[in-house]
């Protein structure tokens, strides 16, 4: 019984998008919080 490669691609794409969004949100929130105080 072979696994569907499309599910692997979908999981990899979802993990990549969620990782990118998490990194972007952490950087954006961090810059947004640090900008007024530490500028």
Image: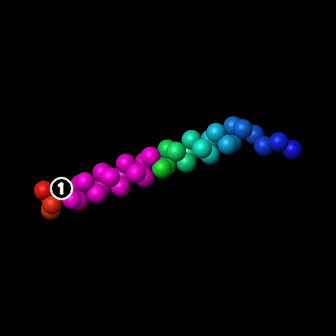
Left or right: 15 in relation to 30 = right
Residue 37: image quadrant is: bottom left
Q: Quadrant of the N terminus?
A: top right
The residue drawn where x is 23% and y is 54% is 32
Secondary structure mostly seen in magenta is helix
In the image, farthest residue toward the bottom: 37
**Total count of labels:** 1
Crowding around mark 1 (Cα neighbors within 10 Å: few <14, some 14 to 19, many 20+) is few
Left or right: 35 in relation to 14 = left
Up the image or down, 32 lies above or below 17; here it is below
Q: Residue 36, image x and y in percent?
A: 14, 58
Q: Is residue 33 magenta?
A: yes
Q: Secondary structure at mark 1?
A: helix
* Residue stretch rendered in magenta on the structure: 20-34
Q: Disc 1 marks which residue?
A: 35
Residue nearer the viewer, 38 or 14: 38
Left or right: 20 in relation to 5 = left
Q: Residue 28, image x and y in percent?
A: 30, 51
The residue drawn where x is 23% and y is 59% is 33
The residue drawn where x is 48% and y is 50% is 19
The residue drawn where x is 25% and y is 54% is 31
Q: Quadrant of the C terminus?
A: bottom left
Residue 6: image quadrant is: top right
């Amino acid at each position: 019984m072979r696994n569907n490669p499309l599910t692997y691609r979908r999981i990899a794409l979802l993990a990549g998008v969620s990782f990118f969004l998490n990194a972007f949100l952490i950087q954006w929130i961090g810059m947004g919080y640090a900008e007024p105080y530490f500028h």
